[in-house]
Amino acid sequence: MSRFSFEHAFEIDTLKRLIAQHQAHFRHRSLLDFYYRGEALSVTAIELGAQDADAPCVLFVGGVHGVERIGAQVVLAFLGSLLNRLEWDTHLQALLRKVRLAFIPIVNPAGFLRGSRGNGQNVDLMRNAPIEAQEGVTFLVGGQRFSQHLPWYRGETMAAETKALIDYVTSLHQRSSSLLVLDAHSGFGLRDHLWFPHAHTREPFAGIGYVYQLHKLFEKGYPHHGHYQLAPQSHFYRTHGDIWDYLVTQVDGKIPFVPLTLEMGSWAWVRKNPRQLFNFPGYFNPQAPHRHHRILRRHVVLMQFLLDAAYGRVLERLTPSELSMLTAEGLRLWFNRGVR
Ligand SMILES: [Zn+2]
């Protein structure tokens, strides 16, 4: 693994450059500072837009897994685009007066330096939250405590990066009227997947009505962008320690909270360029420049949709009876349930 170390901090440099260039236009702070192999690293959060507690919020997260560099790049590219539009884009200016945007482009900077999925101690942060799977966990992939030297290691205690993300999301949720999250990953399958909780159980997530509402609005508004497979993660595999599952069980259920995990289908890149199979980072990241641009623009519509949905308060405005109808629709679509 050390073959890739220290030469792949391009995303960390990009984030530093964005902060240096645009910091007058946003608030940024470090959620965590630490040293790894003599390098000073931090987990940085950036916030733009509305500050009042009544504002809807959208959070973009990347780089939970150090080897999935494209996730951080997609988040950084979108942030860079917004910052460059700020000066002239009056729609965006109006939106930011009403909506708070938050970004944590690189949750796991030590993993970026090491070129590893896990953090500096090889803990898989997405298996590390204090929540146990309830049934049918996939062997190893679901999270394991056999060895730190195998992937999907859960760790013995909560990693500092996990805690920093959990604490920050909890505080964002407490000061927002709704919270939408897009956490960008890569590496699962051929298609672009969008997963929502749960990962720890096959039981439906309480916010499924909100997910169904977003699904319906996106399908209607962008019928030619249906390349996402939207489903509960538990339809694919179950895991221990999923951070989003932990958070949805902890926060106040009255404030809409929809964490979505974008799993970019990187096996399609491998299929087009089988040599990537012999290059570990290449397995999770597109390597040809044209493919790279295509991935960076592929998700912009979805990301902009989340901003617009927050601005339109599409979740806050639902009446209890609308929400219960949407919940029934969601249960029917994703769980084959609810035939009354
Ligand atoms: Zn991942």
Image: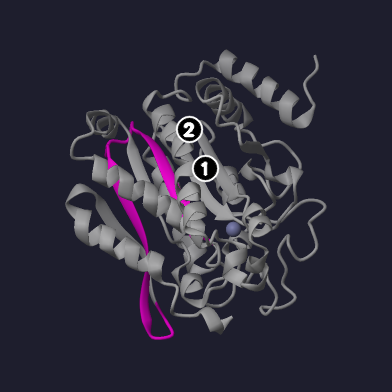
Q: Which residues are magenta?
A: 35-64
What's the residue type where badge 1 is placed? Val
| Ligand 1 placement by image quarter | bottom right
Q: Which residue occupies 23% across, 33% down? A: 89
How many marks can you see? Answer: 2
Q: Is residue 313 above or below residue 61?
A: above
Across and down, in percent, residue 229 comes to 66, 38
User: Is the residue marked 1 within 8 Å of ligand 1, measured from its CB?
Assistant: no
Q: Is residue 75 above or below residue 302?
A: below
Across and down, in percent, residue 37 comes to 43, 85
Q: Residues within 10 Å of mark 2 (few under 14, many from 20)?
A: some
Would residue 83 appear left or right of 36 to someone viewing this image? Answer: left
Q: Which residue occupies 41% across, 72% down? A: 9
Residue 251 circle label = 1
**Secondary structure beneath label 2:** loop
Q: Main secondary structure of the magenta part?
A: strand
Asked whether disc 2 touches disc 1, contact meaning CB atoms under 8 Å apart, the reply is yes
Question: How far apart in space, not on screen, are marks 2 and 1 (Cα)?
Answer: 8 Å
What's the residue type where badge 2 is placed? Ile
Would residue 111 appear left or right of 156 to someone viewing this image? Answer: left
Q: Quadrant of residue 284?
A: bottom right
Q: Residues within 10 Å of mark 1 (few under 14, many from 20)?
A: some
Q: Which residue occupies 77% across, 21% down? A: 338
Write down the residue under mark 2. Answer: 255
**Secondary structure beneath label 1:** loop
Q: Residue 137 lies in magenta, yes or no?
A: no
Q: In front: 54, or 301?
A: 301
Q: Quadrant of residue 99?
A: top left
Can you see residue 22? yes
Can you see residue 157? no
Residue 335 circle label = none
